[in-house]
């Protein structure tokens, strides 16, 4: 079953330093954000995020602040930032 990817980026920001060079991918079918870690050309870790939002994620972008901005099918714009910021 496909997660129906909808947006893809390599994270290069400073807001989430542990995510640097990870792949972040929105999902229409899975209604979540996936964080994928690669070593060379092999996927070594996968984490499902924001599954509780209950929305299809249409697009993902990284802002100059390092925060993530997600657009949902219903037109919501979500800002993802570290706790306390």
Image (tube, rainbow, N blue to C red):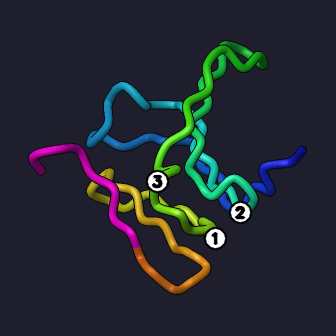
Q: Position of residue 9 (x, y in %)?
A: 60, 49
Q: Which residue is mark 3?
A: 52
| Label 3 – label 2 distance at C-alpha | 14 Å
Q: Is residue 29 left or right of residue 60?
A: right
- Residue at left offset 32%, top offset 30%: 17
Q: Position of residue 38 (x, y in %)?
A: 65, 21
- Residue at left offset 45%, top offset 81%: 76
Identify which residue, 38 or 31, lies in the foreground.
31
Q: State which quadrant residue 60 falls in.
A: bottom right
Q: Which residues are magenta?
A: 78-85
Q: Position of residue 12 (x, y in %)?
A: 44, 40
Identify which residue, 79 or 20, lies in the foreground.
79
Q: Secondary structure at mark 3?
A: helix
Tag 1 and tag 2, C-beta contact below 8 Å: yes
24 vs 38: above or below: below
Q: Name the residue at the left extreme.
A: 84
Q: Which residue is mark 2?
A: 28
> Are there few (<14), some (14-19), or many (20+) residues within 10 Å of tag 1?
many
- Residue at left offset 62%, top offset 26%: 46
- Residue at left offset 38%, top offset 69%: 78
Q: Which residue is mark 1?
A: 58
**Mark 1 or 2: the one toward you:** 2
| Label 3 – label 1 distance at C-alpha | 16 Å
> Are there few (<14), some (14-19), or many (20+) residues within 10 Å of tag 3?
few
Disc tally is: 3
* Image quadrant containing the N terminus: top right
Q: Is residue 82 magenta?
A: yes
| Label 1 – label 2 distance at C-alpha | 7 Å
């Amino acid at each position: 079953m496909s997660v129906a990817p909808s947006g893809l980026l390599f994270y290069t920001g400073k807001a989430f330093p542990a995510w640097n060079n990870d792949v972040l991918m929105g999902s229409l079918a899975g209604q979540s954000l996936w964080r994928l870690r690669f070593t060379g050309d092999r996927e070594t870790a996968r984490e499902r995020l924001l599954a509780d939002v209950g929305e299809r994620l249409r697009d993902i972008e990284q802002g100059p602040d390092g925060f993530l901005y997600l657009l949902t099918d219903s037109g919501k714009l979500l800002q993802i930032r570290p706790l306390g910021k």
